[in-house]
């Protein structure tokens, strides 16, 4: 019997322990398999429209400082990658460290953040 290959990606959680997205090859996918963003080498997380929303922590949460300034929209958005084979379910979440008041779990504060277009996008003429 052939062994199933180990999942090479990373599960993204909120502080409640809910699995909300999957990171695979630098791209973030929601649970339905829709490409919703990407992660830079330094851990910065961007939505698919180029809006920065936070940083990927070591425990696989997207965090940002409560007082962080909003950044300009990225115009160098990577092309939409082909849909990969994503896992059907996730393992139990890790134990999360408590956040200080100055840090915010982005997906706990706003679970629908990946579903909206940025308000920083210019209006269409």
Image: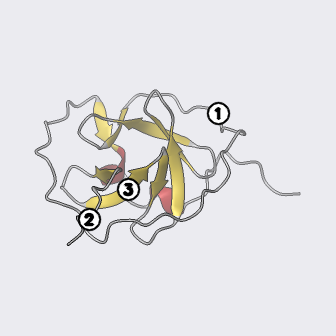
Residue situated furthest left in the rendering:
95
Q: Which residue is mark 3?
A: 22
Residue at x 35%, y 52% (from the top left corner): 107
Residue 56 % position (x, y): 37, 37
Q: Nearer the viewer, mark 3 or mark 1?
A: 3
Which residue is farthest right? 125
- Which mark is first along the chain, 1 or 3? 3
Q: Do labels 3 and 1 touch, CB within 8 Å?
A: no
Regarding mark 2 in the picture, which secondary structure is present there? loop
In the image, 23 versus 46, the foreground residue is 23
Picture quadrant where residue 90 is located: bottom left
The disc at residue 4 is: 2
Frontmost of labels 3 and 2 is: 2
Identify the mark at residue 99; answer none if there is no mark.
Answer: none
Q: Quadrant of residue 22?
A: bottom left
Q: CA distance from mark 2 to mark 1?
A: 42 Å
Q: Residues within 10 Å of mark 3 (few under 14, many from 20)?
A: many
Residue 23 horizontal side relative to residue 90, left or right: right
Marked residue nearer the N-terminal end (3 or 2): 2
Residue 96 in the image: state x and y as whole percent.
14, 42
- Graded by Cα atoms within 10 Å as few (under 14), some (14 to 19) or many (20 or more), the crowding at tag 1 reads few
Q: List x then y, in percent, for residue 29.
A: 46, 59
Query: Which one is in front in this view, the residue at disc 2 or the one at disc 1?
Result: 2
As helix, strand or loop, the secondary structure at mark 3 comes to strand
**On screen, 59 above or below 121?**
above
Q: Are marks 3 and 2 in contact (CB under 8 Å)?
A: no
Q: Residue at x 40, y 50 (%)?
A: 23
Residue under label 1 = 72
- Few, some or many residues within 10 Å of mark 2 (<14, 14–19, 20+): few
């Amino acid at each position: 019997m052939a062994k199933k290959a180990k999942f090479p990606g990373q599960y993204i959680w909120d502080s409640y322990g809910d699995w909300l997205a999957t990171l695979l090859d630098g791209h973030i996918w929601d649970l339905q398999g829709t490409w919703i963003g990407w992660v830079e080498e330094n851990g910065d997380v961007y939505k698919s429209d180029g809006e920065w929303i936070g940083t990927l922590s070591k425990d696989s949460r997207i965090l940002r400082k409560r007082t962080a300034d909003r950044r300009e929209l990225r115009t160098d958005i990577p092309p939409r990658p082909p849909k990969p084979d994503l896992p059907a379910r996730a393992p139990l979440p890790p134990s999360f460290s408590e956040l200080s008041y100055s840090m915010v779990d982005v997906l706990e504060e706003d679970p629908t953040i990946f579903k909206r277009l940025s308000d920083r996008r210019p209006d269409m003429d």
